[in-house]
């Protein structure tokens, strides 16, 4: 049956690719990729020769209707992002919603997502948590921090290396210098690292050792005491 597959891809180690993910990509009629150059290397590694089209945040509004029509006409489409699970801080939501509204089947495979290992590795409570993704760059940033200052659940954020120090300084300012924080970088890669401590301690660490690679920040919620 024609459908949309959301297929997670490795966030680092290629061995994290599942057998099912490879099979789906091999058998699909078309693969939609966030960056065809990045995904091309992945497909070549697993000897996947399926045709690939570009599908990213700058063109997804224009391409969704055509993709839905392809599925209606009997094609099976697989969507992948550069790394991790599509639609988690990556393109995928608009297409998924359009397929659901059109009554088409959507199947998301289980697989790599950066925030899950970062949360588990943090040592912070993970029975209840919220995923915030990327914080606003400018407009709305202060408002977001103020609204999260009273949050009692563990909070998860994505951040780029060149913005990490700014974000950690804001967290120390709005959450308190003694708030527990864990920062994981290069998850599943050769130089994987998790730094844990207070907001002040983690900030000092990365001030002395500038970070590289994509980062996940896990922040303890406000204490109820």
Image (spheres, rainbow, N blue to C red):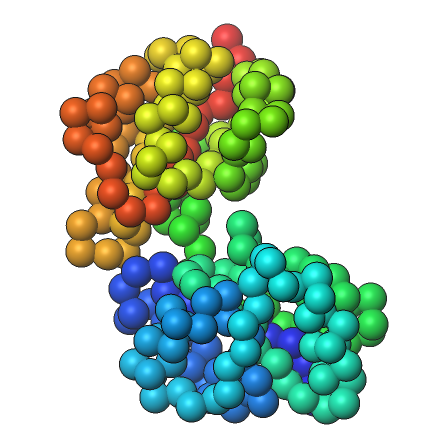
Asked if residue 62 lies left or right of residue 131, the reply is: right
**What number of labels is visible?**
0
Q: Height in image: 150 above or below 38? A: above
Tell which of 139 and 169 is nearer to you.
139
Residue plotted at (52% across, 32% down): 137
Q: Position of residue 207 (x, y in %)?
A: 22, 24
- Residue at 74% over, 62% down: 97
Report the residue that reaches farthest toward the top. 225
| Quarter of the picture holding the N terminus | bottom right
Q: In which quarter of the image is residue 151?
A: top right
* Residue 85 placement, left or right of 192: right
Camera-side residue of 175 and 165? 165
Residue at image coords 50%, 17%: 222
Residue 171 visible in image? yes
At which x and y percent is residue 186?
27, 49
User: Which picture quadrant has residue 204?
Assistant: top left
Is residue 127 in sight in this rendering?
no
Query: How far across and how far down the image is residue 217, in percent?
Result: 39, 35
């Amino acid at each position: 049956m024609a459908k949309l597959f959301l297929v997670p891809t490795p966030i680092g180690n290629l061995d994290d690719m599942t057998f099912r993910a490879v099979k789906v990509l091999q058998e699909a009629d078309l693969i939609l990729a966030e960056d065809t150059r990045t995904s091309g290397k992945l497909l070549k590694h697993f000897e996947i020769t399926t045709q690939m089209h570009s599908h990213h945040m700058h063109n997804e509004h224009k391409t969704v209707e055509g993709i839905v029509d392809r599925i209606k006409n009997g094609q099976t489409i697989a969507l992948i992002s550069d790394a991790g699970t599509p639609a988690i801080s990556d393109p995928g939501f608009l297409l998924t919603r359009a397929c659901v509204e059109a009554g088409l089947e959507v199947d998301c495979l289980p697989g790599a997502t950066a925030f899950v290992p970062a949360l588990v590795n943090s040592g912070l409570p993970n029975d209840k948590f919220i995923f915030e993704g990327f914080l606003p760059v400018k407009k709305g940033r202060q408002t977001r921090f103020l609204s999260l200052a009273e949050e009692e659940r563990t909070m998860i954020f994505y951040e780029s290396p060149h913005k990490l120090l700014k974000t950690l300084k804001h967290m120390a300012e709005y959450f308190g210098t003694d708030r527990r924080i864990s920062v994981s970088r290069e998850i599943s890669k050769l130089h994987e690292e998790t730094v844990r401590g207070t907001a002040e301690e983690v900030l000092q660490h990365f001030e002395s050792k500038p970070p590289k690679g994509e980062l996940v920040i896990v922040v303890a919620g406000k204490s109820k005491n």
